[in-house]
């Protein structure tokens, strides 16, 4: 009910401001809107923006900072008993009190907690009304200031234009800031991790068993931890599975792209291309059980029949299925670049007496190569980041092996297993996940940069 | 050349002129639409013949029939008979790849491959296995570039991309590329339409020189160009061949009123 009332209030405010600005614009011209510099609609828009924007900012600011004010006012209430607690305990106490103050049922609590809960309730009860009044005043006041400026030569159109560009900047800012935030949190948590485990031991160690990490107090902790956080086996596993996936996806994807772009009749293409792209829409977990329940047993059985020992969870099964999963990336992007090679080159080659496959091999593919390479790069970074298939088909054991028939594990899978379940967020085990994430991020970032570079070069060639 | 084609050769001689290619009742349909109507045209060896006419008159369509480039268009259907040295080129026994090696083509827009200048010219000889050694290939590339009048300009930068040349140079590179496969007939589809007057003059001069070794069919929008470079001219209008004959006669004393109207600029 409340949400609908709020929404109604916002609609009424926006509509009222717009109507006020628009009718004022008509009024100052005595009904002849043609002498206005800007259309009346822009005047309405300007009044809406001037009224709503400051209010929105104040609301945002309050949402972010109100907890600080609340915490301060509550801790002032609590007195000696609270001040005796350590800083960490104080924070935890306030968090739980705040949480309880928001919930309907409050069970057994100490008197101090009860005091804190009441403090929070009182704080928000008193500030809510004030906030509502402030917002209303801002809307009316801002709108009035803009409304008063309306004259025939007011450049309301430019004002709206600036507001639009501001909105666009804000939208792209959201994406950029999110990326920045994630990267920074990865870096800081990784630094914490590297204080517990030496950087080079992590990057070049060959033994990975974080579950046996020692968390107790003792002089031996750092030494012991450095032995169980060697990430080489899981990087090797990632590399192995990704390599198998690319070996599957690159030839199949490329050949299907060539078929689609140069051999298929328009009718076949119209059906086959969307169907290939559906492959990209299948959830990876479906690929995962396909890999675990169909491909892995098949590989084991056929391996056994020729005397090979294949473990029931193997890098080969995961890699094969992952390769199938990324075929659409390779084929769809390659198809686009192959199609963008000008028809005149195909004609020129045919006019010299080359067959279709000679033309493709000697002219089209070299011309499209940069685009194809970047398609492969994107497919690789997709494969590196894939988790579900590996969890289900390749296992969790961090073997350092080059044999695709054995079980291996990858970076993403290890991150999952490190963070699943109840974990402390300051132990080396969980922090290792951040370090792995950081390494993974760096690798895919590098791949993406290379891919973008290659695409840029390709563009220069044809523009 | 085989004995059989030698005999055919003597059979189709008319006076001193040897008929190199010949079209009889050539009709072309693009789907439902008919683009060419019963075109009969002889192409004489070692001469330049110009195909002129307003846009959409079918002259390029006819040109593309001569090396079966229309095969790449699915909806295109060619009927009638076109012969090369007396042999039907639409016969099932004909290898279209070999035909296109014998009937080369230069396109309207220069279309060098994104390879080096050397590789562009060596492309045809390589795919047809025309040379026995690297030296022989070098020799063929050099002589092709020389005959296309491009050698002096590019001899020091054969390893640079063909696309780095100017428009006129690119078109001469395409001509060099076409003559490197040693074709008998060279088809040119408005080869100068994308070039400036100086580059055009160079290419026109080149066409005249190439006539010694090749039979040339050129489609052009410029009547001056047709008059300058060709011995025979054929005028197309609305998919029909209106008139053909010696260039001088077509331009000074055309038999048909439509030809007269076109060359004086009244239709087109």
Image: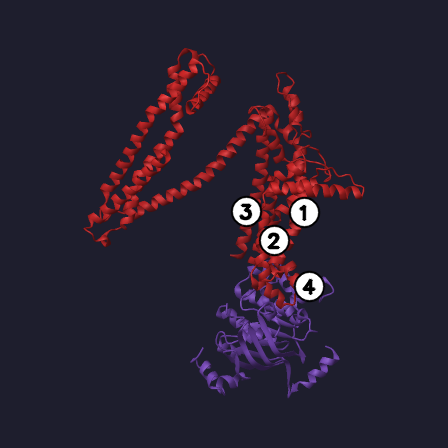
Query: Mark 4 and mark 3 in contact (Cβ < 8 Å)?
Result: no
**Sequence-first disc among 1 and 2:** 1
Q: Nearer the viewer, mark 3 or mark 4?
A: 3
**Quarter in which the N terminus of chain A is drawn:** top left
**Vertical position of residue A393 compared to residue B35: above or below:** above
Q: Nearer the viewer, mark 4 or mark 2?
A: 2
**Sequence-first disc among 3 and 2:** 2
Which residue corresponds to mark 3?
A452
The foreground one among A124 and A339 is A124
**Vertical position of residue A89 compared to residue A192: above or below:** above
**CA gap, disc 1 to disc 3?**
22 Å
**CA gap, disc 3 to disc 2?**
14 Å
Q: Any mark on residue A369, and which? A: 2
Q: In this rendering, do the residues under marks 3 and 2 share a single chain?
A: yes
Q: In this rendering, do the residues under marks 1 and 3 share a single chain?
A: yes
Query: Mark 2 and mark 4 in contact (Cβ < 8 Å)?
Result: no
Q: Give x and y (percent) for residue B62.
A: 57, 76
The foreground one among A266 and A230 is A266
For mark 2, give the secondary structure: helix
């Amino acid at each position: 009910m409340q949400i609908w009332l709020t929404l109604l209030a916002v609609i009424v405010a926006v509509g009222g401001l717009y109507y006020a600005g628009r009718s004022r614009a008509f009024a100052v011209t005595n009904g002849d809107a043609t002498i206005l510099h800007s259309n009346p609609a822009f005047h309405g828009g300007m009044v809406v923006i001037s009224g709503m924007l400051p209010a929105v900012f104040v609301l945002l600011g309050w949402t972010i900072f109100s907890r600080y004010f609340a915490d301060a006012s509550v801790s002032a209430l609590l007195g000696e008993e609270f001040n005796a607690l350590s800083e960490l305990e104080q924070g935890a106490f306030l968090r739980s009190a705040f949480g309880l103050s928001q919930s309907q049922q409050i069970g057994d609590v100490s008197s101090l907690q009860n005091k804190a809960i009441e403090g929070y309730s009182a704080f928000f009860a008193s500030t809510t009304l004030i906030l509502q009044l402030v917002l209303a005043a801002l809307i009316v006041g801002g709108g009035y200031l803009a409304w008063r400026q309306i004259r025939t030569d007011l450049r309301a159109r430019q004002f709206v234009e600036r507001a639009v560009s501001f909105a666009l900047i804000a939208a792209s800012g959201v994406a950029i800031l999110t990326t920045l935030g994630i990267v920074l949190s990865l870096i800081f948590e990784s630094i914490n991790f590297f204080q517990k485990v030496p950087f080079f031991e992590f990057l070049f160690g060959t033994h990975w068993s974080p579950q046996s990490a020692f968390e107790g107090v003792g002089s031996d902790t750092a030494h012991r931890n450095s032995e169980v956080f060697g990430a080489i086996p899981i990087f090797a596993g990632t590399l192995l599975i990704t390599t198998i996936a690319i070996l599957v996806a690159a030839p199949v994807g490329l050949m299907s792209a060539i078929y689609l772009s140069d051999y298929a009749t328009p009718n076949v293409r119209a059906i086959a291309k969307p169907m290939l792209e559906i492959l990209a829409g299948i959830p990876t977990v479906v690929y995962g059980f396909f890999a675990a329940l169909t491909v892995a047993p098949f590989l084991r059985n056929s391996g056994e029949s020729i005397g090979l020992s294949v473990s029931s969870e193997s890098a080969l099964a995961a890699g094969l299925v992952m390769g199938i999963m990324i075929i659409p990336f390779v084929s769809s992007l390659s198809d686009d670049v192959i199609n963008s090679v000008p028809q005149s080159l195909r004609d020129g080659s045919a006019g010299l007496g080359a067959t279709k496959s000679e033309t493709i091999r000697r002219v089209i593919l070299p011309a499209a190569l940069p685009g194809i390479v970047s398609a492969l790069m994107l497919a690789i970074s997709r494969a590196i980041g894939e988790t579900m298939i590996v969890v289900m088909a390749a296992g969790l054991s961090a073997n350092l092996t080059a044999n695709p028939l054995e079980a291996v594990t990858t970076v993403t899978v290890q991150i999952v297993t490190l963070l699943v379940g109840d974990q402390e967020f300051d132990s080396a085990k969980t922090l290792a996940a951040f370090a792995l994430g950081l390494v993974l991020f760096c690798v895919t970032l590098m791949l993406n940069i290379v891919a973008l570079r290659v695409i840029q070069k390709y563009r220069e060639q044809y523009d | 050349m085989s004995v059989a084609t030698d005999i055919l050769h003597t059979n189709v001689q008319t006076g001193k002129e040897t008929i190199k290619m010949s079209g009889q009742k050539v009709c072309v349909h693009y789907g439902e639409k008919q683009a060419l109507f019963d075109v009969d045209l002889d192409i004489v060896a070692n001469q330049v013949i110009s195909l002129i006419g307003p846009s959409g008159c079918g002259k390029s369509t006819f040109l593309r029939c001569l090396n079966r480039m229309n095969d790449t268009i699915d909806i295109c259907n060619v009927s009638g008979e076109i012969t090369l040295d007396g042999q039907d080129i639409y016969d099932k026994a004909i290898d279209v790849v070999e035909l296109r090696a014998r009937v080369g083509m230069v396109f309207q827009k220069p279309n060098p491959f994104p390879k080096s200048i050397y590789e562009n010219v060596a492309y045809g000889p390589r795919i047809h296995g025309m040379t026995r050694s690297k030296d022989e290939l070098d020799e063929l590339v050099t002589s092709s570039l020389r005959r296309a009048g491009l050698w002096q300009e590019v001899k020091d930068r054969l390893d640079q991309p063909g696309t780095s040349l100017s428009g006129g140079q690119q078109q001469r590179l395409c001509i060099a590329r076409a003559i490197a496969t040693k074709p008998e007939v060279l088809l040119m589809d408005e080869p100068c339409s994308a070039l400036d007057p100086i580059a055009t003059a160079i290419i026109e001069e080149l066409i005249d020189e190439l006539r010694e070794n090749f039979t040339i069919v050129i489609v052009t929008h410029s009547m001056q160009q047709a008059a300058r470079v060709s011995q025979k001219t054929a005028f197309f209008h609305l998919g029909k061949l209106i008139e053909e004959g010696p260039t001088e006669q077509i331009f000074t004393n055309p038999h048909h009123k439509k030809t007269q109207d076109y060359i004086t600029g009244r239709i087109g």
